[in-house]
Image (cartoon, rainbow, N blue to C red):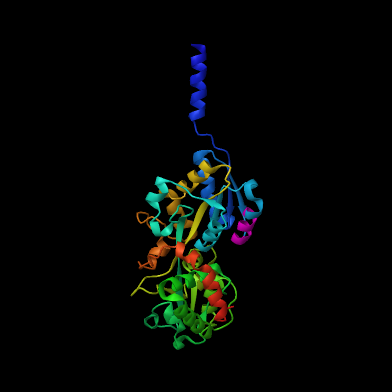
């Protein structure tokens, strides 16, 4: 009887999930992700160790560390980097009913190597004083000579622009996309420089009339505690490109479980936590991003921009066409 009781106790402990810490390599700034990770720890008692840095540097680090890498989860801000990590065999596929139910198929890898945690759009912002929104139409329209000397945009080394270009390659082919890129370069008001907030500031300063930026940068400025940022952001308006066709380009922040994750179960649990109701609402309120779930309302700032039609392309296509996009942009003189 005593042996039977001992066996039952051992069996009970074996069946209970035992989680260690979960180690995240994150390309997101700490202040943009730590609050929700702290909430995860409060609810699960799983400690989160966060290593932040540039996405490419983190991917290189994972590759160098190999089987000894402590990384459990790679968190990045563009699907292109997730695809790159998958191609380098740094991620492992995940099977999760929770993730599959909450993340639409176009926003996850078809083999389960990565999932979106939040969405953002590459929008056009324009000067309320100098631009009639009726003159705007699509990304393709930015190559029209009407916009000569009037466009600000980041460099071709920026992954967001690479993904936008990759989406155009997927939709209209290399030749047409290269023509578009050449036209865009000819219409730039200045050589590409700075980040997305700098493009918005350039429009307000009169250096250009329109700019291509990620939606959450403008949302962050509009909801900033700094009056100067709000003042700048309120001088531009949002235009959703390609509403008469395929819809506006969408990208993600997303995550994938590391191939050699020492705490794989905890990593998957964290991913599932990031798509629950509270986390999705937090992404919108704190970061100005769109939830991946249609049943979660967007923030008041995003609501004020109105609804829009999103491109439904499978986002893994952006990674597949990334290398060609970079070569094309280089040929077009986009620096």
Vertical position of residue 36 compared to residue 326: above or below: above
Residue at far top of view: 1
Q: Nearer the viewer, residue 79 or 216?
A: 79
| Magenta region includes residue 57 | yes
Q: Nearer the viewer, residue 156 or 134?
A: 156
Res 209 seen here: no
> Which residue occupies 47% across, 81% down?
180
> Which residue occupies 48% across, 11% down?
1
How far across and down, in percent of the image, does residue 300 sit? 40, 61
Vertical position of residue 15 compared to residue 87: above or below: above
Query: Is 198 positioned to the left or the right of 114 in the image?
Result: right
Q: Quadrant of residue 157?
A: bottom right
Q: How many marks?
A: 0
Magenta segment, principal secondary structure? helix
Query: Is 192 positioned to the left or the right of 252 in the image?
Result: right
Vertical position of residue 314 compared to residue 176: above or below: above
Query: Is 125 positioned to the left or the right of 101 in the image?
Result: right
Res 203 seen here: yes
How far across and down, in percent of the image, does residue 32 sit? 54, 56
Q: Which residues are magenta?
A: 54-62
The C terminus lies in quadrant: bottom right
How far across and down, in percent of the image, does residue 183 sit? 49, 84
| Magenta region includes residue 71 | no
């Amino acid at each position: 009887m005593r042996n039977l009781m001992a066996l039952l106790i051992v069996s009970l402990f074996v069946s209970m999930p035992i989680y260690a810490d979960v180690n995240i390599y994150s390309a997101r700034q700490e202040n943009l992700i730590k609050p929700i990770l702290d909430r995860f720890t409060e609810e699960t008692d799983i400690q989160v160790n966060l290593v932040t840095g540039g996405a490419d540097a983190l991917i290189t680090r994972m590759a160098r560390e190999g089987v000894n890498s402590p990384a459990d989860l790679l968190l990045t801000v563009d699907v292109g980097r997730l695809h790159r990590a998958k191609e380098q065999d740094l991620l492992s596929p995940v099977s999760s009913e929770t993730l599959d139910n909450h993340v639409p198929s176009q926003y996850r890898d078809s083999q389960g190597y990565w999932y979106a945690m939040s969405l953002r759009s590459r929008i056009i912002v324009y000067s309320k004083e100098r631009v009639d929104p009726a003159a705007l139409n699509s990304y393709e329209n930015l190559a029209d000579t009407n916009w000569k000397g009037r466009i600000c945009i980041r460099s071709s080394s920026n992954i967001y622009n690479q993904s936008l270009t990759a989406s155009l390659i997927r939709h209209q082919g290399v030749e047409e996309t290269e023509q578009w890129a050449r036209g865009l370069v000819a219409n730039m008001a200045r050589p590409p420089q700075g980040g997305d907030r700098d493009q918005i500031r350039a429009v307000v300063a009169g250096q250009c009339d329109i700019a291509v930026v990620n939606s959450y940068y403008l949302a962050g400025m509009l909801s900033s505690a700094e009056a100067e940022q709000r003042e700048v952001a309120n001088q531009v308006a949002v235009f959703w490109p390609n509403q008469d066709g395929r819809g506006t380009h969408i990208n993600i922040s997303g995550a994938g479980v590391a191939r050699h994750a020492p705490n794989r179960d905890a990593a998957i649990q964290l991913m599932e936590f990031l798509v629950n109701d509270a986390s999705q609402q937090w992404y919108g309120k704190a970061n100005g991003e769109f939830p991946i779930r249609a049943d979660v309302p967007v923030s008041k700032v995003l609501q004020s921009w109105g609804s829009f039609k999103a491109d439904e392309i499978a986002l893994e296509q952006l990674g597949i066409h990334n290398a060609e996009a970079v070569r094309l942009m280089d040929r077009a003189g986009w620096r």
